[in-house]
Image: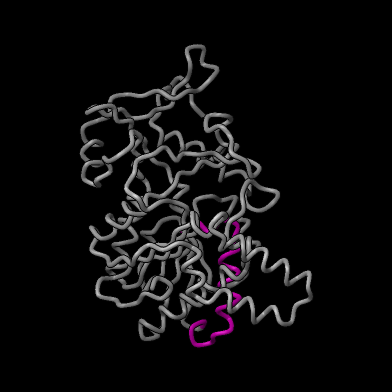
Amino acid sequence: MITNKNKLLSLDKFINLALYNKQKGYYMKKNPFGKRGDFITSPLVSNLFGEMIALWCISFWEFLKKPKKILIVELGPGDGSLCSILLKTFENFDHFYNSLEIKLLEKSKKLEKIQKNKIKNNKVNWINKIEEINSGPIIFIGNEFFDSLPIKQIYKKKNLFYEKHVTLSKNNKKIKFVYKKAKKNLIKNIRKLNLISAGNTIEYPIRAIEYLDKVSKKIKKHNGGLLTFDYGYIKNVNKDTLQAVKKHKYSKILSQPGSSDITSHINFKSFLEILKSKDLDVEKIVTQNEFLQRMGIIERANIISKNMNFKTKADMFFRLKKLLDYNEMGKIFKVLFAKKKGKKFSLGFK
C-alpha cells in the first residue's frame, strides 16, 4: 500500500489507496454491507427507508410537471439494496415507471457485480463518471456516499497550518501519521470555505467538493436536484471525525489498510455553502428522523402492520426505531436537498 517510492502520502491519497486501490482497496475486494460485513446502512435496516425515498422522487417528478423522461442517478449504490427497493415501489406507479431511467455510479467492479446480481432490470445502467450523464431532469441520490470520500486534515496551531500525512516508520515496518507545513493554496481554500473556526483539526472534503461541482453543473444544465443522506454535523466547529470500522466495531485507521472502512463526518454547513456558491437553492438541513416522519413513514408502517403477525410486526417496528431514534440513526444522519434555482419544492424539509 505504501512503499519506499511513495513513502509520504497526504491523508486523502492514503484513504483513496486504502479504499479504492484496484487490487487491495477495501471497496474493491469485498462486500462490506450487512450483518456478515462491517456495517449496515438504512436501506438494509428497513425497506420503508427506500419506499419513502421512492415516494419523494415521484412527488418531485410530479412537481416538475411529469416530464416524459426522468433520470435517477444513485451515487455509490452499495450492495444495490436501495435501488432494488426503489424499483419495486416505482412499479406501482405506471406513468412514472414508464418515464424512468436509472444510472448507478460505481467505482468498484466487485460491488458492481453484486449489484448486477441483485438488480435485473433494463431500466438500470452503470456508469463510472458523472460526465457520462447527458440528459435530464436528474435526481441524484446519495446514501452514505459523501462520508466515504477521501478528505484532507489540517492541524492549526496558532497561525500556522500543518497537513496530515501518512508515512513509513524508519524500519519500514509500520505506518504512522506525520504533519508537514500546509501549502499556501490549501490554506487559501480552507479560508475560502470559512473552515477556520473553533477547534484545531480542520477537515477539508477535497473529493466531495469535486463531486458537488460536477453534480451542480448537471443539475443546472438539465434541471433536477440532489438528495443525500449522511452522518454529520451542522454546527460550525472543527474536529477530527476520521474513523475506521471493521465487523461493526471501530478499529485503528492505520491498522491493516484495505481491511476496514474509513469514513468522516460531513460538515453540512460547509456543504450548504458550497452548493449555494454553485448557484443552487438548498433547503434547510434536517435530521433523518424529521425527513422520514414528514414523508409519512410511521403512517405507512401502521397501515402495512395490520396484516402482519406479532413477530413480523415487532421486527418491523424495531427496525423503524433504529432509523428514527435520536440515539441511533435518527439524529446523527442528516438530509440535504439541493435543486435548480427557483424551484419551490420542499417536501420532507418543512
Where is residue 257 shown, x and y percent of the image? 55, 33
Q: Is residue 204 left or right of residue 332?
A: left
In percent of the image, x 36 and y 74: which residue is there? 346
Magenta stretch, main secondary structure, is helix
Instruction: Determine whether 98 is above or below 339 in the image.
Output: below
In percent of the image, x 41 and y 56: which residue is there? 129
Where is residue 113 shown, x and y percent of the image? 61, 56
Q: Is residue 130 left or right of residue 2?
A: left
Among the 4 quarters of the image, the one containing residue 213: bottom left
Residues 123 and 215: in front is: 215
Q: How is the image coloured?
A: one colour
Instruction: Determine whether 247 is above or below 294 in the image.
Output: above
Q: Is residue 88 left or right of residue 57?
A: right
Q: What are the residue bounds of the magenta stretch?
A: 75-97
Residues 200 and 345: in front is: 200
Where is residue 137 shown, x and y percent of the image? 36, 74
**Residue 24 visible, this orientation:** yes
**Residue 116 visible, this orientation:** no
Residue 90 in the magenta stretch? The answer is: yes
Residue 50 in the magenta stretch? The answer is: no
Where is residue 13 shown, x and y percent of the image? 41, 35
Q: Which quarter of the rendered picture does the C terminus lie within?
A: bottom left
Residues 184 and 123: in front is: 184
Residues 207 and 319: in front is: 319
Instruction: Determine whether 145 is above or below 133 in the image.
Output: above
In percent of the image, x 30 and y 62: which residue is there? 216
